[in-house]
Image (tube, coloured by chain):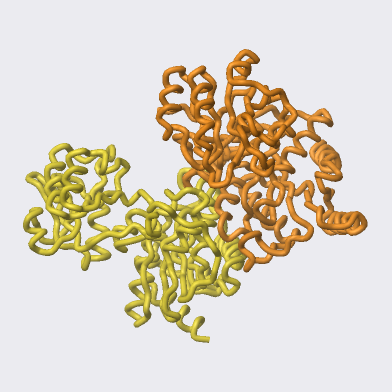
Chain colours: A yellow, B orange
Amino acid sequence: MTKLTTVQLKAPYLILIGDLTDPTYAKTGFGIVDWRPDLVAGQLRFAGCGIDMGVPDMSVAEALKAGAKSLLIGVAPIGGVVPESWWASIEEAAGAGMDIICGLHFKLADFPAVAAAAKASGACLIDVRTPPADLPVGTGIKRSGKRVLMVGTDCAIGKKYSALALDNAMREAGMNSTFRATGQTGIMLAGEGIPIDAVVADFISGAAEMISPDNDEDHWDVIEGQGSLFHPGYSGVSLGLLHGSQPDAIVLCHDATRLSIAGWEHYLLPSVAECIELHIQTGQRVNPAIRCVGISVNTSALQEQDRRQYLDDLSEQTGVPCVDPMIDGCAAIVEYIQSTFSE
Amino acid sequence: MTKLTTVQLKAPYLILIGDLTDPTYAKTGFGIVDWRPDLVAGQLRFAGCGIDMGVPDMSVAEALKAGAKSLLIGVAPIGGVVPESWWASIEEAAGAGMDIICGLHFKLADFPAVAAAAKASGACLIDVRTPPADLPVGTGIKRSGKRVLMVGTDCAIGKKYSALALDNAMREAGMNSTFRATGQTGIMLAGEGIPIDAVVADFISGAAEMISPDNDEDHWDVIEGQGSLFHPGYSGVSLGLLHGSQPDAIVLCHDATRLSIAGWEHYLLPSVAECIELHIQTGQRVNPAIRCVGISVNTSALQEQDRRQYLDDLSEQTGVPCVDPMIDGCAAIVEYIQSTFSE
């Protein structure tokens, strides 16, 4: 039987950018360099590349010497296909024992030369969209340590970004915290995690339980959220993640000017108040003490004065700190957590 | 691209019972004979069989002559394994062009002789635990026709049975209704459906939308429920199914004497009132007119007088008819639906 585990990545990474010319398609690479520079050994670029992530250029051989453990495909080209000319480098890295990490829709193992090279060297081919085998059903048994889950009024509304910013702010404030990933980009940033929306439905909360296991009593898991309880396509993922995470706290992620569910425009966004209320109501099933500790709002479409007013009004309505993490940071939410949970 | 579809079975079935001696393990077969005798051509029994489902005995050849389209494995033996001696008959049926239908945990295609026989004849090997490929994400777009979804305070609390009984009662009352299956036994009874808990998390509500497609305005889909919004392991399945089904009505399934979630005894059963409330609250997201139209209670552990009192009290509290479908039938719920939806 396979040992129960999350998807596990080995850092440092050599990030493959190839000969890409448009930075739009290198978001994955830039995200890792921005958020987790400590995981990055260097970048692998080919002649004609128009992008520079500002980290050392390395060949596969140089990266190996520098201690790189994995080659990470840091791009999402149009069509989701890696150009033919890149595969020689991927095969070289796999043959030299580096794990290959990929978040695109194809499977690495479907490329026979890469599969053979990895098999010969013992390297792993890791498709971060593929959940680990043999996930358990959720038990609902209380775990030690504390958890804060990002939730949202919609998908793609800043849950990953908010979790990363909050985790950073907690550690800056001297707290003991860990970012916990539930999506593919998050997994590359965390070095581990489970792509929760790719799990078989029966195992959503079981996978969520594995993502934030027992921990020290003063430790906080800062868990990346997925979907929304109000999303007509993805609500099941969100409820399973909420129940499996059994959070002590939630941070609601919202967009100040979004009116309807992105891509599902026939559904209006829920109000912040009803969204908090439903999360508290359903989250109490697994953690009776659950409370909302802050609201993380994308206010980029507002002028500064309107922005300030919007956040102040929302904070007065809800009684919790409201911030735009890109502009204000998450210190106000951290302070609120510290005062609330020291009681 | 695969055409979007549910799992589709071809009746009539020849039900394989083999040489089983304990009827406990032939629940699947008995369920089909009880609920859908119209789908059954006969039973295939071997020497030493201790079970009789009361339908004609047939060899594979006789079943073919009688028009049987599928051989259905009607048992769930200990260990989930079909005895070695049965495979010759399965291979014979597959070779003669009969589909093979199986709900056990192995995959039929992993048996090379059966796979080869099916390939040669064009027969399908149908593992009803395996969802169809290329399921869509839920759209939340309103569909025509009416839907009633069974929901529950727990798993294994009578949702399939209640749906079958309600569908029968609706048709007896002259209504236009169809039982819609979301689990493997239900799929064998309905001849089609999707095992919703085996679907990848992102596609739960999309699968639910396919299970109850657009229909005539006076048509009712009676949808088998799964799990419970209050279940720490399976709540994600339940919310995705609720949102994808966009029910006009729910029937809450409950057990009069069950105190805690079966197998999760550290979780008390929710009250009937809070369970109805949460379903209405979340179901309104996709169907603002959703309402509870009845409660289906397993009262088998109560004495007749207590049973009557229990149902009367619950009906007074909730304002909807409360029945034990095994004892009272579902006529009271059908009447309530007819009067409520004729307004």
In the displayed structure image, the side of residue A299 where residue A248 appears, left or right: right
- Identify the residue at the far front of this view: B48
Q: Is residue A337 above or below residue B108?
A: below
In the displayed structure image, the side of residue B167 where residue A127 appears, left or right: left
Which residue sits at x=42%, y=48%? A198
Q: Position of residue B94 (x, y in %)?
A: 50, 22
Which residue sits at x=39%, y=72%? A330
Q: Name the quarter where the C terminus of chain B is drawn.
A: top right
Q: Position of residue B256 (x, y in %)?
A: 79, 58
- Identify the residue at the far top of this view: B65
Q: Is residue B113 above or below residue B208?
A: above
Q: Is residue A203 above or below residue A47?
A: below
Q: Is residue A342 above or below residue B48?
A: below
Relative to the observer, which residue lies in front, B237 or B137?
A: B237
Q: Could you say which quadrant of the image residue A270 lies in?
A: bottom right
**How many circles with numbers are drawn on the protein?**
0
Q: Position of residue A157 (x, y in %)?
A: 43, 56
Q: Position of residue A268 (x, y in %)?
A: 55, 49
Which residue sits at x=65%, y=59%? B262
Relative to the observer, which residue lies in front, A260 or A284?
A: A284
Q: Name the quarter where the N terminus of chain B is drawn.
A: top left
- State whether residue B22 appears in this view: yes
